[in-house]
Amino acid sequence: MEIYLVRHTETICEKGICYGQSDVAIAKPFDEVFSKIISELPSEAFIFSSPLKRCVILAKHIQENIKVISYQEDKRLMEMNFGDWELKNWNEIPPEELNPWMEDFVNLKATNGESFTELHERVGDFLSEKISKIKQPIVIVAHAGIIRSILCHQTSLPLKEAFQNKVDFGQVIRIEL
């Protein structure tokens, strides 16, 4: 089955801000980028989206421009929860917290956050429950962490290598599952 992984467009956050599950808006204007994204998608599809507004705005625009078989928002498609680090500049996070996480983001988590393994498990649950039964094309509007996790599921790439998969703002990645 065809799956189109779509990362949300740029946010209003300045560079260097950790904003995982914080519900931040996307930068305007976005019409041109949205049009490019639409041009890379099938004419009809199931659409799944993270419930965070940076994804929902794009998903609703897609919904208005292709034939939608079904549209659903799913919390399991939310970006990694960075807990106490949310909306902080990465440079402001104490090195004694950040450095161990940078060395082992797969297993360690930000204070009151989640690890990449936990994110990967919820993405796996989503794929098993929602995706496995669908035969038509699927569009998933989500975040870089979610897309990297899906790519790891698809290719059996070890989680510690997930950042080998570059995922740009507004990028569409087509895969077969």
Image: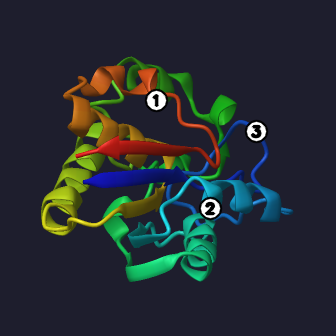
Q: Amino acid at mark 2?
A: Ile
Going by the image, does 37 lie left or right of 2?
right
Residue 108: x and y, percent? 30, 33
Judging by the rendered image, the residue that carries numbered circle 1 is 97
Choose the circle earlier in sequence order: 3 or 2.
3
Q: Position of residue 149 (x, y in %)?
A: 32, 41
For marks 2 and 1, the one nearer the N-term is 2
> At label 1, which amino acid type do we have?
Glu
Looking at the image, do the residues carrying marks 1 and 3 touch, with CB atoms under 8 Å apart? Answer: no
Can residue 124 be seen in the rendering of this structure? yes
Which quadrant: the N terminus? bottom left
Quarter of the rendering containing residue 64: bottom right
Q: Picture coordinates of residue 173 (x, y %)?
A: 47, 42
Q: Quadrant of residue 153?
A: top left
* 82 relative to 93, above or below: below
Q: Considering only vertical position in the picture, is 52 above or below 4?
A: below
Q: Amino acid at mark 3?
A: Lys
Of callouts 1 and 3, the N-terminal one: 3
* 174 is higher (above) or lower (below) than 76: above
Judge the density around disc 2: few (<14), some (14-19), many (≥20) Cα neighbours within 10 Å.
some
* SS state under label 3: loop
Question: What colouring style does the render use?
Answer: rainbow
Q: Nearer the viewer, residue 35 or 51?
A: 35
Say which residue label 3 marks: 15
40 or 73, which lies in front?
Answer: 40
Q: Is residue 128 left or right of residue 143?
A: left
Q: CA distance from mark 2 to mark 1?
A: 40 Å
